[in-house]
């Protein structure tokens, strides 16, 4: 099997290894250059790492990578664009609960929770990759407050106390996400200033 990384053919991969060993070696070489694997194409079929690791054979595999910093900045840009949509969605959920439209509110609540989870994970990973101190500028306190609000929201949700959920979303969760957006912007600014 021919092996390409970012368009360049490599003939020095150890032996006729399995797809898993080829993947491991490609990732090792890519990460050694400050880049991250973003795509795998085996015989012009795009696949994820798990699928590729299980294949047997193939004529050629193309690994595509990009700089870690570029991926971080793209992720933070996406997070900054997403925050207003998340806030708008949370406001809609609160409104549904206030209008006793519980089924509509419940339906959107799962999406809101997934979105908030993505936002927090993206921020966490970018913070780690940029080697930023997470305890600076009141971020730790904000995260603890956000965790407490999410726990409170979960507790009132379990008891189906929809008016309290609406209040918690409007008075606690949304303001905390707005404060959090400042930290996302700071991280974005830091990431672009250290290129």
Image: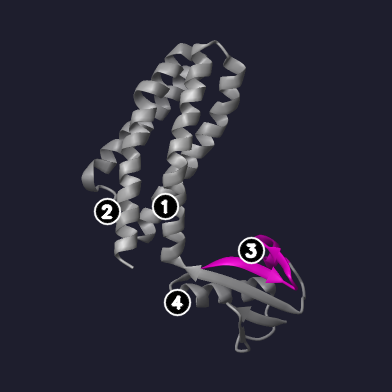
Question: On the image, numbered disc 4 is attached to which residue?
Answer: 33
Q: Count every numbered label the image shows and give the total.
A: 4
In the picture provided, is 7 more to the left or to the right than 89? right
Question: On the image, numbered disc 3 is attached to which residue?
Answer: 49
> How far, Cα to Cα, is label 1 from label 2?
17 Å
Image quarter in which the C terminus is found: bottom left
The location of residue 9, given as percent across then percent down, is 62, 85
Q: Which residues are magenta?
A: 36-54
Question: On the image, numbered disc 2 is attached to which residue?
Answer: 133
Other residues around mark 1 within 10 Å, as few (<14) / some (14–19) / many (≥20): many
The label on residue 76 is 1
Other residues around mark 3 within 10 Å, as few (<14) / some (14–19) / many (≥20): some
Other residues around mark 2 within 10 Å, as few (<14) / some (14–19) / many (≥20): few
The location of residue 137, given as percent across then percent down, is 22, 45
In the picture provided, is 105 more to the left or to the right than 57? left
The location of residue 20, given as percent across then percent down, is 65, 70
């Amino acid at each position: 099997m021919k092996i390409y990384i970012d368009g360049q053919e490599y003939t020095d991969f150890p032996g006729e290894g399995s797809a898993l060993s080829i993947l491991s070696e490609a990732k090792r070489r890519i990460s050694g250059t400050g880049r991250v694997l973003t795509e795998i194409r085996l015989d012009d079929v795009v696949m994820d790492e798990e699928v590729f690791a299980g294949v047997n054979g193939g004529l050629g595999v193309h690994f595509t990578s990009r700089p870690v910093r570029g991926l971080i900045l793209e992720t933070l840009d996406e997070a900054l664009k997403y925050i207003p949509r998340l806030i708008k969605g949370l406001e809609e959920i609160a409104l549904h609960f206030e209008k006793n439209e519980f089924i509509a509110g419940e339906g959107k609540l799962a999406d809101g929770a997934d979105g908030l989870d993505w936002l927090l994970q993206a921020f966490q990973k970018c913070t780690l990759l940029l080697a930023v101190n997470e305890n600076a500028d009141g971020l730790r306190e904000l995260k603890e407050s956000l965790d407490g609000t999410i726990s409170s929201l979960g507790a009132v949700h379990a008891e189906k106390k929809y008016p309290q959920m609406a209040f918690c979303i409007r008075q606690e969760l949304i303001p905390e996400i707005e404060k959090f957006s400042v930290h996302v912007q700071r991280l974005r600014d830091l990431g672009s200033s250290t290129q």
